[in-house]
């Protein structure tokens, strides 16, 4: 490797730093935070808000039965096409067409991937070349930015004023237009938004579609959390907003609402030409989603009557209690319309956000993800509140106490 | 995307063509081969030599029990570190150190991936930047070349004269030296070689190590098939050949010999700095190997006494019978020293290799992979003979009959 290439390569991996990413806390050295510490430990049951607790919310029923059937089926299920089992894609395409309100071509328009992360990676790899400009929302899922940077793309940030209200997500559409005018031909966003839980209004989705049509932009819509939609909320699917099929890739999976993350399953559907590229790439990235695991997708969108409603109600109850705790302490927090993320704003602290997060872990047994992972948000923390209800509320109170201790 | 970027991007994906890749035959249109056809169908039980038959050779015992235990363990197993469960990596590092004859650092020197394909992808992504030169053996596993091209690297081919004998793999060491002199700082190869089953001799491994040390080259050794080693063969591990730890990454997995491909599990071990980059990348590629599946690795290197020997003997018996069939028909074929691939040479045919492969499928119900996937080998086909013994022999006879029909 030349020195120049080596330097470039170091930069490329620096952009991928995972030390503060959710789930990687085991690899964080505690660092020298002893001298920052105020007060002692605050006792309480440990809560890891960096991801959902699949012990508190068990996987959707039937998953392990379908897995066992697939194992018994043997080679046919172990070695599917790279894009996944044709039978399962037919079943899913019907469910996803009904769910999103626009047709899904089972054969040419679907690919099963190792998790929605796998789908997102393949979609960005298929669409971003070195030097390309990509419109990215701030704040949004941290991997969006990292993926674009890894493939040498340039992100054009588009602000979301998520604290403005709760009828709209708060996307700055003028900035989005400016990004398209500046040359972005890809718009990548999560809806509901990760980390805030904001859902884009029908008007916002419509205007995004109008702009995308005017500028020939392709859209990758990460709708991972869209099924966990709270009472009286409505949801507009990007792919049903009138754009040509070739312009929209939608990404979903059963890892969150359905607690099937341990199986690593996702799906991308839409634009056949993009799906085709994604499959070519999957052939060298991981071959396919684990064959036996794919069968677990047969439970998806076929949960027992009432199962999803019950799950939504349980999460809504936790959400409301946590909002009460944070708002009583003046931590401004948007009400999530869907999903299980909360993104409270902290007051100015006497320590840096990264240190506060480490102190939270050390003194209060609470793990959260720093807002800086999602954009320029040095004053926020993200919580995945798909947790044991009582433990989550108690941990939120410990966060508030820690905020009081470290307030500037 | 600019026109230039679009053109580059089209090239990038053209290099990844999967139509002839193993396992993708379902997606091949039969094409216009009707007018080429000589004679009728040759009946017999269909055999798909593009991959091993996990129904003929069942997964290693205990896999599904470990999976079920992991499922019962819940969140702890669903959300491992990106590089995989720390406990399982400790167990594996002991087994792999004993197997390869050199220490393995469990914490810093191992990463569990979705299949060995996942490990190979991450290793190449971590080590190849646009413009880098990489030494690649011809013939060798097709993904090696595709991965290097995808990341903008240039392959410097190194010939393996695998028909020369069976004491050595036949690598042209002068060409390897020339590739290093020309600037290659990475050497990526499979051992046993895929598609030929050649195993590098101790002398070859030693000379590769000497050259790598002299030119500061990093080596990625794909040893996927190294456990399926036939009677009286010996195997030299690249990582035990005296290079600094930082210079060798070894890739293995239980997909082949152990028939656990349906779980998608692999491991890369060695150079900590490279493993660290691979983990950063895995965080955006697929997060982690499926959490529950990782537990299946607990069965690996712990098979019941005699299990591996029995598996080796069964494969050796099939290998010997197929070699007899091909050699009786004058199809020159190297005796594989390990693994379950055969790479017979066909005589000049009246049709192109791609058409012959399609005709084989249409007329003789036999699926093979064309030699052109592995390098400039328009006269060879690859068979994975991990199949039902009798069905494999009968299918090999049909291949011979088809060769006679289409001989020029």
Image (spheres, coloured by chain):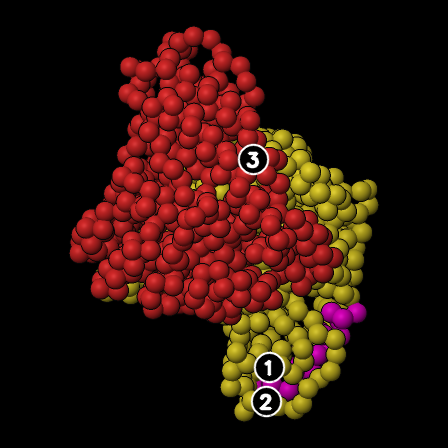
Chain colours: A red, B yellow
Tell me where the magenta segment starts and ends, as one range. Answer: B390-408
Give the residue at mark 3.
Answer: A53
Find residue A339 and report its image quarter. Answer: top left
**Residue A328 x, y percent position in the rendering:** 38, 23
Q: Residue at x 73, y 82 (%)?
A: B43
Q: Main secondary structure of the magenta part?
A: helix
Gap in angstroms between the C-alphas marked 2 and 1: 7 Å
Find out whether the residues at labels 3 and 2 contact each other: C-beta distance under 8 Å. Answer: no
Q: Chain of mark 1?
A: B
Q: Nearer the viewer, residue B164 or A296?
A: A296
Q: Residue at x 41, y 35 (%)?
A: A342
Any magenta on residue B393? yes
Q: Nearer the viewer, residue A140 or B44?
A: A140
Q: Chain of mark 3?
A: A
Lower sequence index among marks 2 and 1: 2
Give the residue at mark 2.
Answer: B37
Give the residue at mark 1.
Answer: B359
Q: Residue at x 37, y 26 (%)?
A: A327
* Callout 3: SS: loop
Gap in angstroms between the C-alphas marked 1 and 3: 53 Å
């Amino acid at each position: 490797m030349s020195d120049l290439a080596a330097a470039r390569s170091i930069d490329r991996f620096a952009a991928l730093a995972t030390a503060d990413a959710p789930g990687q806390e085991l690899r964080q050295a505690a660092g020298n935070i002893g001298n920052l510490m105020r007060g002692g430990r605050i006792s309480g049951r440990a809560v890891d808000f960096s991801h959902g607790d699949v012990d508190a919310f068990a996987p959707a029923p039937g998953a392990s039965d379908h897995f066992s059937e697939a194992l018994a089926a043997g080679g046919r299920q172990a070695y599917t096409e790279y894009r996944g089992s044709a039978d399962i894609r037919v079943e899913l395409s019907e469910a996803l067409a009904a769910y999103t309100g626009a047709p899904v071509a089972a054969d040419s328009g679907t690919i099963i991937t190792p998790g929605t992360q796998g789908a997102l990676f393949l979609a960005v790899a298929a669409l971003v070349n070195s030097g390309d400009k990509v419109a990215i929302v701030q704040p949004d899922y941290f991997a969006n930015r990292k993926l674009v940077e890894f493939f040498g793309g340039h992100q054009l940030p588009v602000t979301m004023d998520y604290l403005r209200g709760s009828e709209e997500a708060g996307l700055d559409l003028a900035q989005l237009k400016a990004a398209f005018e500046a040359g972005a031909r890809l718009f990548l966003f999560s809806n509901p938004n990760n980390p805030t839980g904001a859902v884009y209004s029908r008007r916002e989705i419509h205007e995004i579609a109008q702009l995308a049509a005017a500028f020939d932009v392709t859209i990758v819509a990460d709708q991972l959390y869209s099924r966990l939609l709270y009472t009286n909320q409505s949801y507009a699917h990007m792919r049903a907003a009138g754009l040509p099929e070739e312009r929209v890739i939608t990404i979903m999976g059963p890892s969150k609402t359905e607690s099937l993350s341990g199986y690593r399953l996702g799906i991308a559907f839409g634009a056949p030409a993009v799906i085709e590229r994604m499959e070519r790439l999957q052939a060298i990235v991981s071959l396919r989603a684990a064959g036996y695991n794919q069968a677990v997708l047969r439970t998806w969108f076929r949960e027992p009557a009432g199962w999803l409603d019950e799950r939504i109600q349980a999460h809504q109850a936790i959400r409301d209690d946590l909002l009460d705790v944070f708002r009583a302490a003046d931590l401004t927090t948007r009400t999530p319309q869907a999903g299980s993320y909360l993104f409270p704003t902290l007051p100015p602290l006497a320590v840096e956000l990264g240190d506060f997060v480490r102190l939270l872990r050390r003194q209060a047994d609470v793990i959260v993800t720093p807002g800086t992972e999602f954009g320029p948000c040095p004053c926020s923390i993200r919580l995945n509140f798909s947790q044991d209800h009582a433990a989550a509320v108690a941990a939120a109170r410990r966060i508030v106490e820690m905020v009081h201790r470290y307030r500037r």
